[in-house]
């Protein structure tokens, strides 16, 4: 990877807007956003030996072990489209994965999109879906013209089970429990072997998509200026 490459990790709870920001960052800096979900699906589709093992594990309902995920991530970041860098979304999830990644490659930034729990609950529990088309509404931010009805067909909108307030709060509890040690790992690094530590930056994720995007772009543009 060249001097001007950019290797990023995006942290943030469900509903923080990581997917949206990952796409925008990838487009601006010409680096591929990489999610572990995409990696696992691609491995299964390509039917490599590792992909066949992943398929068996996933179909049995088990979690894919760290060593397999790490191997898949290593293979992915060695691909030609990552020569100018990459953005990891959803990896690492644990300190063990972070330590393995640290040994694989240098990293530049860990960007943590921070959104208060109540705001996340409001964002996710307010979503409504039109089952027939997949159109998405939000009772606060993007309401249908008639409450509870699709704008095009007039059919009833639904709330997905994953978006119920109870489920959202459970997901957030699991996320905070799993991710707190990871945040500490990056926010308060100690001297460890392997490659250099990335800079940890917490971004306020409560603004609009454009506001959050601009904060991230300002941060990354400054880095680009310093390495010219």
Image: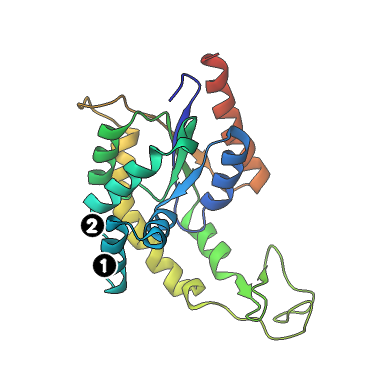
**Residue drawn 33% across and 31% down?**
105
The image position of residue 29, as x and y in percent, is 58, 33
On-image quarter of the N terminus: top left
Q: Which residue is mark 1?
A: 57
Give 170 or 128, whichever is nearer the viewer. Answer: 128
The answer to whether 17 is drawn above or below residue 139 in the figure is: above
In which image quadrant can residue 30 be found?
A: top right
Q: In the picture provided, is 207 more to the left or to the right than 118? A: right
In which image quadrant can residue 123 be found?
A: bottom right
Please, what secondary structure does the residue beneath circle 1 have? helix
**Residue drawn 55% across and 13% down?**
228
The answer to whether 86 is drawn above or below residue 136 in the figure is: above
Give 178 or 34, whichever is nearer the viewer. Answer: 34
> Marks 1/2: CA distance?
9 Å
Q: In the picture provided, is 87 more to the left or to the right than 150? A: left
Near mark 2 (Cα within 10 A), the count class, few <14, some 14-19 or many ≥20, is: few
The answer to whether 166 is drawn above or below residue 208 in the figure is: below
The image position of residue 53, as x and y in percent, is 26, 62
Query: Which label is found at residue 124?
Result: none
In which image quadrant can residue 182 be found?
A: top left
First-in-chain label (1 vs 2) = 1
The image position of residue 50, as x and y in percent, is 28, 56
Give 67 or 220, whichever is nearer the viewer. Answer: 67
Q: Which residue is mark 2?
A: 65
Q: Are marks 1 and 2 in contact (CB under 8 Å)?
A: yes
Can the viewer see residue 138 in this picture? Answer: no
Farthest bottom residue? 155
């Amino acid at each position: 990877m060249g001097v001007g490459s950019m290797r990023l990790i995006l942290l943030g709870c469900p509903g923080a807007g990581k997917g949206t920001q990952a796409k925008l960052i990838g487009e601006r800096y010409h680096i591929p956003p990489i999610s572990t979900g995409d990696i696992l699906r691609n491995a299964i589709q390509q039917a490599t030996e590792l992909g066949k093992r992943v398929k068996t594990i996933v179909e049995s309902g088990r979690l894919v072990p760290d060593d397999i995920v790490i191997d898949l991530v290593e293979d992915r970041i060695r691909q030609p489209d990552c020569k100018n860098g990459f953005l990891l979304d959803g990896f690492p999830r644990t300190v063990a994965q972070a330590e393995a990644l640290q040994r694989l490659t240098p990293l530049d930034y860990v960007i943590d999109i921070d959104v208060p729990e109540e705001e996340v609950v409001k964002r996710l529990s307010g979503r409504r879906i039109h089952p027939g088309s997949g159109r998405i509404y939000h009772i606060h931010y993007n309401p249908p013209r008639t409450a509870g009805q699709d704008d095009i067909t007039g059919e009833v909108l639904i709330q997905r089970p994953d978006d119920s307030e109870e489920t959202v709060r459970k997901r957030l509890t699991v996320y905070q429990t799993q991710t707190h040690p990871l945040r500490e790992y990056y926010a308060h690094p100690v001297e460890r072997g392997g490659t250099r530590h990335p800079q940890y930056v917490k971004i306020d994720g409560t603004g609009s998509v454009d506001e959050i995007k601009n904060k991230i772009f300002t941060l990354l543009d400054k880095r680009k200026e310093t390495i010219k």
